[in-house]
Amino acid sequence: MTGEKRTQVVIVGGGQAGLAAGYHLRRLGVDFVILDAQAEPGGAWQHTWDSLHLFSPAAYSSLPGRLMPPQTGEEYPDAEHVVSYLRDYEKRYELPIQRPVQVKDVDREGERLRVETDSGTWHARAVISATGTWWRPFLPAIPGREKFGGKQVHTVAYQRPQDFQGRRVIVVGGGNSGAQIAADLALDGIDLTWVTQRPPRFLADTIDGRALFDAATARRRALDAGRDDAGGVASLGDIVAVAPVREARDRDLLRATPMFRRLTTGGVEWADGTSAETDAIIWCTGFRPALSHLAPLGLRGPRGHIPTIGTRAATEPRLHLLGYGDWTGPASATLIGVGRTAREAAREIAMLLR
Ligand code: FAD
């Protein structure tokens, strides 16, 4: 696509959130296009580490309209299975997706929004931003990071334990990525130190993504009804005890150490002033929403988020944000949760266009 084009709605991002939005807009008869920076379907799932499995069974990881089929021999499907499911999903619903198209800027243009891409300009009456977080890895400001002479990677660049064979590795981060990558390395016999800011909090072994979704839903309902916030999922713990994490924990391979205070050229210095040598650090320190294309709209609020009412930007009714986390709808950053918020966004947009 080059030149100038018009449509009612541009969806930026063709991962699961963008597809769910497309599904609902199609049902409402709205004209739209999905612009996705990736060359292939699957969003971030194309790039995760080899051993990653979902934290919910297939049927509980489904987008609207089509159940994810089970993966033979796996109760919790792997990332490749998710990619095939998304590929099949967009084909089945004939979603109008253009790839690879990078959206550079979204700005106001009278009654429309102008969407500048690396291959032309779209003029739309509404925009749904569904660009995910994988593309903005977050690294904490730790003194000495630039001095460290070993290998440093973020979660996004970790693939498999074999890449760290024979090395002493520190994994930083007490969330799901940190625990899973630490388990992946530990079960492969890598010399591992797992560092977390506070003691890791494992969810009960019986809790998987299904229970998390239910807890997120209950929390939303309580807040909507003006009842007290019981803490939802966060009160239960941080780490889903998926099979490899459980195994590593039960074999006592997942002992966490408190955070170091600085990096040195050859390793780390602990809070008590002692030090340790290491060859590699894997930063499992999270992500931020990929929102730079929305900068011209000047909507950013605290913590880099855009204030929202539901999925709608509070001060720009033509913009909706989907899939970034609970601030864009309960469990909206999950396969099973994004459908509900996508439906709400699509309905609001259809009303706006009327
Ligand atoms: P993405 O999958 O990131 O898709 C966004 C798309 O937008 C990408 O294709 C990207 O290239 C494109 N894009 C970005 N910027 C632009 C731009 N400017 N122009 C055009 N295109 C752009 N959820 C579950 O339900 N179950 C799980 O078990 C689970 N495990 C997870 C494990 C990990 C390690 C992580 C990080 C997340 C996990 N999630 C899980 C959460 C969530 O489901 C995934 O992060 C999912 O990929 C989010 O989908 P998305 O569509 O919002 O974003």
Image (cartoon, grey):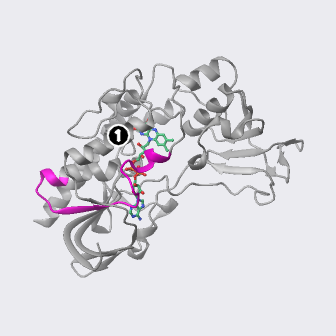
Front-lying residue, 326 or 227: 326
Task: Give how far across and how far down residue 16 sits, in percent.
Answer: 34, 47
**Where are the magenta residues, as a range?**
25-47
Location of residue 15 with respect to 313 vertically, above or below: above
Q: Is residue 118 left or right of residue 23?
A: right
Task: Give how far across and how far down residue 290 sits, in percent.
Answer: 46, 60
Q: Residue at x 20, y 55 (%)?
A: 346
Query: Is 248 part of what is drawn in magenta?
Result: no
**Is the distance from the Cβ of mark 1 to the nearest ligand 1 atom less than 8 Å?**
no
Note whether residue 116 is visible: no
Q: Residue at x 26, y 43 (%)?
A: 89
Displayed quadrant of residue 348: bottom left
Query: Is 28 part of what is drawn in magenta?
Result: yes
Amino acid at dot 1? Ser
Note whether residue 79 is visible: yes
Q: Residue at x 20, y 39 (%)?
A: 65
Q: Is residue 192 left or right of residue 38?
A: right
Q: How dense is the environment of label 1, judged by Cα within 10 Å: few (below 14), some, or many (20 and up)?
A: some
- Residue furthest bottom as drawn: 110
Q: Is residue 255 left or right of residue 20?
A: right
Q: Is residue 31 left or right of residue 226?
A: left
Number of numbered labels in the structure image: 1
Displayed quadrant of residue 139: bottom right
Q: Quadrant of the N terminus?
A: bottom left
Location of residue 6 with respect to 61 vertically, above or below: below
Task: Give how far across and how far down residue 354 sits, in percent.
Answer: 9, 65
Task: Give how far across and how far down residue 135 sits, in percent.
Answer: 50, 56
**Badge 1 is on which residue?**
84
Q: Residue at x 51, y 55 (%)?
A: 288
Q: Secondary structure at mark 1?
A: helix
